[in-house]
Image (cartoon, rainbow, N blue to C red):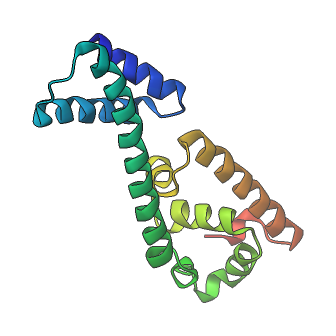
């Protein structure tokens, strides 16, 4: 148990989220059990640290690959237009002029009904980062709409 706590702490200090660090550590212990290694205790600790880092890198690469597939196949420009409705032309035009990052976040949250947590998982960013960016996107959208003369009463 002491080794597990050490590895978790090491991974967290390396910038890995606590739940991910626990998962990686669990994977390392499963590898030890499955492989039935006969390493001396002095070398086992170093092997566990190396294996934990390699396992995290593998997971990171896999997640990045999945994110790229999601981004390419599900979040293309065509899928960003579910609000292509005559009543919302002014909203669509305003959104289309915003940065891609803001546009995607607003679309995922308001039009695709993803939660903050789900958006964080999809984009690979922290929930707090998503909340802050979403707040900035809302503020910019509101300012843009107000500068064009629209009020919140005109948006249903």
Query: Which residue is at 51% across, 51% downward?
Result: 124
Which sits in the foreground, 154 or 112? 112
Question: In the image, is residue 26 above or below residue 116?
Answer: above
Query: Which residue is at 18% across, 30% downward?
Result: 32
Q: Quadrant of the C terminus?
A: bottom right
Query: Which residue is at 59% across, 39% downward?
Result: 128
Question: In the image, is residue 20 above or below residue 112?
Answer: above
Which sits in the foreground, 135 or 76? 76
Left or right: where 38 falls relative to 2: left
Horizontal and vertical percent for residue 31? 19, 36
Q: Quadrant of the N terminus?
A: top left
Horizontal and vertical percent for residue 50? 38, 32
Horizontal and vertical percent for residue 115? 46, 52
Q: How many marks?
A: 0
Quarter residue 34 falls in: top left
Query: Which residue is at 82% across, 67% downward?
Result: 144
Which sits in the foreground, 120 or 87? 120
- Residue farthest toward the bottom in the current orientation of the protein: 86
Which sits in the foreground, 1 or 73? 1
């Amino acid at each position: 148990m002491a080794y597990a706590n050490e590895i978790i702490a090491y991974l967290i200090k390396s910038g890995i989220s606590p739940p991910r660090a626990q998962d990686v550590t669990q994977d390392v212990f499963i590898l030890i059990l499955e492989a039935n290694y006969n390493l001396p205790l002095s070398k086992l600790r170093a092997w566990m640290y190396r294996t934990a880092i390699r396992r995290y890198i593998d997971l990171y690469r896999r997640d990045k690959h999945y994110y790229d597939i999601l981004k390419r196949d599900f979040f293309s420009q065509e899928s960003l237009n579910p609000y292509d409705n005559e009543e919302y032309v002014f909203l669509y035009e305003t959104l289309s002029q915003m940065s891609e990052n803001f546009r995607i976040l607003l679309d995922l949250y308001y039009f695709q009904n993803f939660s903050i947590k789900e958006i964080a998982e999809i984009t690979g960013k922290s929930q707090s980062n998503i909340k802050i960016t979403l707040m900035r996107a809302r503020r910019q959208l509101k300012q843009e709409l107000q500068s064009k003369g629209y009020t919140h009463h005109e948006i249903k």
